[in-house]
Image (spheres, rainbow, N blue to C red):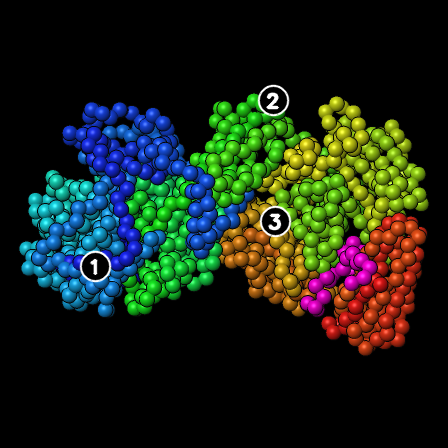
Amino acid sequence: MVSAPGWPSFSRSSGWRTPKRASGRRSTAWKEPCPSCCGWKVARRWWPLPRPPPPMGPCGPGRPGRAAGPNPRPGWGKGRQEMERRRGNRWLAAVLALLLIGLLSLFGPGHWPPGGWPVARPTSPTATPQPLLTPTASPASDSLPPAAPLPVEAGWKARPVATVVSRELVTTTHLATGDATILSVALSGDGQTVAFAARGDPGIGQGDNGYDHVYLHERASGRTRLLSAAPDGSPGNGWSGGPALSADGQVVAFYSWASNLVAGDTNAVQDLFVYDRRQGTLTRVLAARGVQPNDRSGDSSGQTPPALSGDGRYVAFQSRASNLVDGDGNGRVDVFVHDRRTGETTRVSVADDGREANDDSGAPALSGDGRYVAFQSRATNLVSLGGAAAGEAPPGGHSQIYLHDRLNGTTVLISATPAGLPGNGDSVRPGLSFDGRFLVFQSAASNLVDQDLNQSADIFVFDRESGEMQLISRSSAGIQGNRDSTAPAISPDGRYVAFLSQASNLVNGDSNGVADVFIHDLLTRHTARASVGVTGPSLGVEADGPSLGLPAIGAGGRLVAFVSTATNLVPGYGRGGAGLFFHQRQDLPTFVVRGRVVDTAQQPIAGATVRLGPHEAMTGDDGAFAFPHTMAGTYTAQVEKPGYGFQPPRQTVSVLVDTTLGDFVGVAQGGPPIPFLDLPLAYDGTVIGFLQALQDTDAGGYVDAWFDHAYPDYSKNGELLLWDGLRRSSQAYNPALGCFEGRCYDGHDGVDFPYRPPAGQPGRYVPLPIYPAAPGQVLAIQTACTGAGRWCNGGYGNEVWLDHGNGYFTRYAHLARVDVAVGMWVTPERSLGLMGNTGNSYGVHLHFGVYRDDGNGRWDGPAVDRPVDPFGWAGAAADPWAMERGAPASYWLWRYDPVRTFALLGSRGATVTDATGTIEVTVPPDALDGQVKLELAYGPATPAPPLPLRATGRSFRLAVLESLHQAESVQATSALLRAPVTVAVNLAGLDLRHLEPGQLALYQWTEGAGGWQRLPSQVDLANRTVTAQASHLGTFALLAPLRCPGDPLEPDDRFHGATEISPGGAGQLRLLDVADDEDWIRLEMAAGARATVVVEPQHPALRPALTVFHVDGLTQLADAEAGAPGEPVRVSWQAPHDGTYFVRIRPAADSAVGCEVAYRLRLP
């Protein structure tokens, strides 16, 4: 294991000290003797991995009593079966689990995303091929006895009692006293033996000679011994460090500059040393024929440790020496494996054909049997990639991770994209599971997996059997760390990974601002924090100092050793410097969640993807799925398969015992239709573009109601679910109607286009013709609703229905006049009538609806041929309108793309402008590598900006759709650009009266940074533009704060934004901040009822005026002129009809306005 980067060389000491055991429980072996197994029987198996190869010799392959072949029960070891038999009362285990979850709430978040996150999954075990190398037993505590106690002999000393603190959940041992500082740590497989490097005397009276030294510590007895010592017991005369420990705890390897550790050390360089506990010997690894290495082994300061096989026979190390093997002429640091039994040394950082690496290699990791060696290298000639010249990998200047198979002599690239290209950032510090199946490493590359968007170093795990790569430095909810994660260590069984991270979002409550140690469980997808105090006075306390270097993990993943400068992890511990701590953890119980996916005929659907929280599974031929390792909690299950919608679209379940879900039923939805629709209206004689129609502003746009996929049946719940799959909750300034940025209202089953008066002529109505959205035959009309009341024709008023002959029907409602007859064939040039407000209409507008035939080829009415959204459904989850309500699927039906602009960019850069000229993006040369298809797409500012910020209607997304012939992948969104792009936003047409124009700025949504991040922006109000530069692609919005934050209901200057008020109560306290401010309220009244609205000025110079309107055409019913300044104003009326009534409040021409001009509105 290794220290933190930048640390100087290591030092050591010697001697044991045995303390009295502190109160508390001590870790015990999880094994049972099993003579017939020639070793130890697994008493509890933690992960369904292939059983390691059997040892050679008396109990080798084919020995009596052991069946050949894979485990007869795939996915379950013998120990797992025994664990199931011993599980006992599962209800009690569940209750204890919930209590423990509460106790450890600081260590991992409990928020699971509905869709989970894509990761590799452990696969069923397969038969392991017999290696030609001598295999060794697994080091996990499940399959090995504890290391034999170190003999009490001369030179071994006991440590003082006060330095050991033990607790049930966490055992924290501080080995360094006085001025000693712990630098790095290594653990045996069972966690009972510890090797560490320290600077200064760790309390045994040796090693304080100015150098770093390596020590060996036995946790059971508390004895510590100096290993980097001369034969006479004196400390080494040079720096030593970077210890590695074999899984059985019997062999320690380390680097040292000392020349007095063994006789004949005269080469004056750092060498590799191996201490064998069985024989009590310290030896130096020499070159061929016993010659001293002619250059340094290890790195310049001993930071990168060597690696040992499970029994310590093989040691892997890095060296610049050229005489360790024949033919070493590259003058580079290479990786070697030394066989301590035969004395043979081989070089493994070579290509398949034996070519030498053309750059440095190092940081080796070994599998338990010594067959597989992982290492990092900057060489470009170790593997051949498709399209690369002369068999060399594409140059990139980055360190990559390689895996060498000593049995087959092959070397493969691990840190690669799914297409096989090298990672686009440095990959370092590999680690291997005992069987060599799982390889962990740290990487700054962003192209190894999809959606790596945090621009930080992450931890990755590669499954050698399945070929899958997964990013595991995530929270339990699947969220990537928002800062660098480094220094990974993998448990021998490959289930757990410990790592350091400065991220603050991996667990709840991480606010200490320092690097912590985390543990990720690849089986349950759970991430917990280890560097915390969890017992006594330190219960739940965050570390007050950073953790350093590489953590070590042992005891089947239940024990993590780490170095930290924190002073509060152990009660009563307050010394300075870096100390050594042990985090002892317990596995929570897990349960099985299973179910099946079938079609409407109850036949199984195979190949469907099922997600349960962070887990993912695929249905088999029988349609069944199972999640066998689910922790207690609440989860939402979802199913996906192209061509299907599923009912129900999701199931939420609380897991306290093994659970079976109800069936998911898949409905085949067929292929999408050919898009055929165009806009059905014109403004000033010109059909407007979709981009203009869809621009979203708080003051209103050309669309003021959308199809609500959650409840398109006029059942209001204060929330909208649009075709993009994003939910918009009611804003604070218009909570009644469920508007978002001015777009009302929820529960709508069509698209509403409101009337817009000619420019500069507010209030003027010019008859506006309505056109067919596509050719079709007039199916039905309604013409009797003019002046006939609000609920004429079910509230839709005068309307026209068209049959387009392709299974779709369109509806044009609230018309003032109808100009066609039933049976007529109409084209888009033929007017259907005039826009109006007949029926239940809040002002002049067009209700445009699209309906799909139920399959019988005829119109059966809207109750049978049900409405669909012409914008389709682009959400990540299933469309609830189709799945929960059994409605037809919605598809994209517009003839042209209304919201996107595409540009193919090369190395010269380009300027991308939307169709309306509102957004202009200038991409400089070489900002993006190679040819890139860039998308500029409009969209609402989602999530909505927090108060006092308001959306202006200029929100959009920049994303890469394709990257052609690139050496490096470009992320679709949030990609880091080589040079910043310049974004110019046109302010023309924006209503900014309630905002602070001088504080307009472009914001970018940054998930990892926690929301909308302001970009440095230049505001030019004279030319009506705002410009900014962005170094990442992503989602952008032009935002500005309210002029008067004291009135959070603004802007509500149209009746669409009216808030509902009821009689009695304290009423509303509002402001009139600008001269043309209008505040609207609404109330429901029965015919004949009377109402009075009172406005009480809270400012002596305020003169408010009131006007009452009826919803039918916004007919004016009553008004109240402003009185004397500061005097209350009231208006009364009697409702002529059942329905909705609006009251508008605005300042008189000579009234005071501003942020201090308040009034109280009451409905007595």
Q: Is residue 135 above or below residue 489?
A: above
For label 2, count other residues whose C-alpha is less than 10 Å away and answer few (under 14), some (14-19) or many (20+): few
Give how far apart the Cα atoms at labels 1 and 3 are.
70 Å
User: Sequence-wise, which precedes: disc 2 or disc 3?
Assistant: 2
Q: Is residue 758 visible?
A: no
Q: Quadrant of the C terminus?
A: bottom right
Amino acid type of the residue that numbered disc 2 sits on in the rendered structure: Ala
User: Sequence-wise, which precedes: disc 1 or disc 2?
Assistant: 1
Q: Is residue 1022 above or below residue 217?
A: below
Q: Which residue is mark 3?
A: 936
User: Sequence-wise, which precedes: disc 1 or disc 3?
Assistant: 1
Which secondary structure lies at badge 1? loop
Give how far apart the Cα atoms at labels 2 and 3 are.
44 Å
Q: Nearer the viewer, residue 417 or 332?
A: 417
Q: Is residue 842 visible?
A: yes
Is 225 left or right of 439, judged from the image as shown? left
Is 13 left or right of 1094, judged from the image as shown? left
x and y percentages locating residue 1032 in the rendered image: 52, 55
Place residue 414 in its image quadrant: top left
- Which range is magenta? 1043-1065
Amino acid type of the residue that numbered disc 1 sits on in the rendered structure: Lys
- Prevailing SS of the magenta stretch: loop
Amino acid type of the residue that numbered disc 3 sits on in the rendered structure: Leu
Which label belongs to residue 601?
2
Observer-side mark, 2 or 3, equals 2
Is 159 left or right of 1099, judged from the image as shown? left
Place residue 437 in its image quadrant: top left
Q: Which residue is mark 1?
A: 20
